[in-house]
Amino acid sequence: MRNNHEIDYKIYGEELQFVEVELDPGETVIGEPGGFMMMDDGIQMETIFGDGSAASNQGGLLGRLMNAGKRVLVGENLFMTAFTNVGQGKRRVSFAAPYTGKIIPLDLQQLGGTIIAQKDAFLCAAKGVSVGIAFQRRLGTGIFGGEGFIMEKLDGDGLAFVHAGGYIVEKQLQPGEVLKVDTGCVVAFQPSVDFDIEFIRGIRNWMFGGEGLFFAVMRGPGKVWLQSLPISRLASRIIQYSPQFGHRREEGSILGGLGNLLDGD
């Protein structure tokens, strides 16, 4: 028996996905502002303070302010949008991914009730799922771990959806099993996974390897989700080949610099 609203879903697309959530009468799904795509008639949209979970409503107005304020620390909005089926029969509402990648459905009831995720990963969830923060306990992990001291924490027993870039790999680590990952490729993991960082050995590796100075070291047991294309890596490549910030447009052209002259540069 779930305490959170029980919703059904279907994910469409390959690289640019959206998730369609099916709501029975009275059911609600919450989403980040800007993630909404479309909805059936009979669904009521309402902007709410916080995430609408029981945890976010504890402690009166001050407690709600503090809980909602935590979301600002992970780069999220103070407000979320709730979509409730107020009609008769099933209704559907869809949420779109913000960039190319995959949408990951997480059944928190089957995953132990808590998932730690990278900042800005949350897309939508059944009402009742708490979207909070998780602090990195180690100083080194917080400074060099790629996601800083603060990550998102999803609590509850309902469905939650997160988004990540490129292809997504889910791995089940056994007790004591170690996986070394690029710090930007970590999407989410269960709290039973020990998350730390390790300095890359060898001066030639970190000077000329182009992979940064640190690995993310993940030690089982527990599940981890990894992305092949972090948004930071995609953004840096776009900037690198932008005429304003990086290479010029004559690259790859038989006209060379003459192409820029003809183009008005």
Image: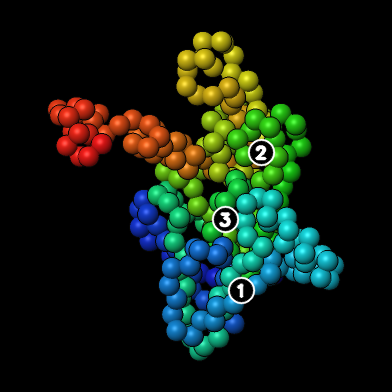
- In the rendered structure, the answer to whether residue 233 lies left or right of residue 6 reads left
Q: Nearer the viewer, residue 246 or 148?
A: 246
* Residue beneath disc 2: 148
Q: Quadrant of the N terminus?
A: bottom right
Could you tell me which secondary element the residue under label 2 belongs to? Answer: loop
Could you tell me which secondary element the residue under label 1 belongs to? Answer: strand
* Residue beneath disc 1: 47
Labels 1, 3: front one: 1
Dot placed on the residue nearer the N-terminal end, 2 or 1:
1
Q: Nearer the viewer, residue 113 or 148?
A: 148
Residue 76's place in the image compared with 219, above or below, is below
Q: Position of residue 60 (x, y in %)?
A: 83, 71
- In the rendered structure, the answer to whether residue 235 lies left or right of residue 28 reads left
Labels 3, 2: front one: 2
Let me know if residue 219 appears in the view: no
Q: Residue at x 42, y 43 (%)?
A: 166
Dot placed on the residue nearer the N-terminal end, 3 or 2:
3
Quote the CA–CA distance across marks 1 and 3: 17 Å
Residue 138's place in the image compared with 128, above or below, is above
In the current view of this chain or complex, which residue is farthest to the bottom? Answer: 88
What label does residue 3 carry, if any?
A: none
Sort mark 3 into few (<14), some (14-19) or many (20+) by Cα contacts within 10 Å.
Answer: many
Q: Mark 2 is on which residue type?
A: Gly
Quote the CA–CA distance across marks 3 and 2: 17 Å
Q: Position of residue 115 (x, y in %)?
A: 65, 50
Q: Mark 1 is on which residue type?
A: Thr
